[in-house]
Image (cartoon, rainbow, N blue to C red):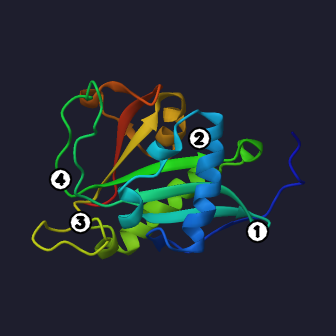
Amino acid sequence: MTLPAKPQLTVSTPMRGTSSAVFKDAMVVRTEVFVHEQGIPIYREIDDDDERSIHWVVYADGQTPVGVIRLVPSPHVPLDLPEPHGDHPEGTFFKLGRTAVSKKYRGLGIARILADVTTRYACDNPGEVGPRGKDGVALEGLGEWDGRCLVHAQSSVQGMWAKSGFVLDPAMGEWDEEGIMHVGMWRVLRA
C-alpha cells in the first residue's frame, strides 16, 4: 500500500454522542480497524459509552476519515470481563479509548495527534469532561474532573502512549479484551 504524497491532516471539531457526522465517520475507521482487522464483533465495538463520549476524527486531505479517538467521562464501572484486571480505579478521571488509525495511514503520528488534541481539549474545557450520565448530560453531586486521564492501551502500542506522557499502572496488571492484551496507563493533566 502506498500513501498519497504527504496527506494534509485535519482534526474534526469534538462532538458528543452518536448522531453527528463525526461519529459516523469515526465508525468507518473503528469498523475497519477493530472489526475487520482485529476481529472484534461489531456488537462489542459499539457500547453505551459512545452516547456520552466526545469523539474526534482525523481526516486526510479534508475528506477521508483515517484516525479516531473518544473521551469517556466518569463515572466508570468495572469492565465486564471474565477475569477482571486489578482493582478498578476510582475518581472523576476520564478515559481515552477506541483510538484507531487506518492501516495505510499509520506511521504519520496520527494517534499522537489525537492524544494531544484530546488532552489539550480537556485542559481547556474541564467542565465538558466531568461526570456525565448515559445521555451525556452532566451529573451533579459527583464533583468535577479530577485532572487525571486513563487509557486502556493495547499492550502492543503502549510505547505510543508513553511518548504522549502516559505512565504504566502496574497495579492494574495486564488483561485480555476480545483476545487483545491491554494495560492501564495514566497521565495527570492538572493538579
Label 2 vs label 3, nearer the camera:
2
Taking the spot 77% from the left edge, 44% from the top edge, the residue there is 104
Q: Amino acid at mark 2?
A: Val
Taking the spot 59% from the left edge, 40% from the top edge, the residue there is 35
Coordinates of residue 53 in the picture (x, y in percent):
39, 63
Q: Earlier in the sequence, mark 1 or mark 3?
A: 1
Q: Is residue 161 above or below residue 64?
A: above
What is the CA distance from the residue labelled 1 to the residue labelled 2?
22 Å
Residue 3 relative to residue 118: left or right = right
The image quadrant of residue 152 is top left
Q: Earlier in the sequence, mark 2 or mark 4?
A: 2
Residue 172 relative to residue 98: left or right = left
Q: Identify residue for label 2.
A: 35
Q: Amino acid at mark 1?
A: Gln
Q: Identify residue for label 1.
A: 63
Q: Identify residue for label 4.
A: 91
Q: Which mark is residue 131?
A: 3
Question: Which secondary structure, mark 1?
Answer: loop
Instruction: Count residues near mark 1 (Cα–Cα under 10 Å), then give few for <14, some for 14-19, many for 20+.
Output: few
Label 4 vs label 1, nearer the camera:
1
What is the CA distance from the residue labelled 3 to the residue labelled 4?
10 Å
Coordinates of residue 100 in the picture (x, y in percent):
58, 47
Marks 3 and 2: in contact by CB < 8 Å?
A: no
Q: Amino acid at mark 3?
A: Pro
Q: Amino acid at mark 4?
A: Gly
Coordinates of residue 87 in the picture (x, y in percent):
18, 33
Taking the spot 59% from the left edge, 59% from the top edge, the residue there is 26
Q: Considering depth in this image, is 43 or 183 the residue closer to the camera?
A: 43
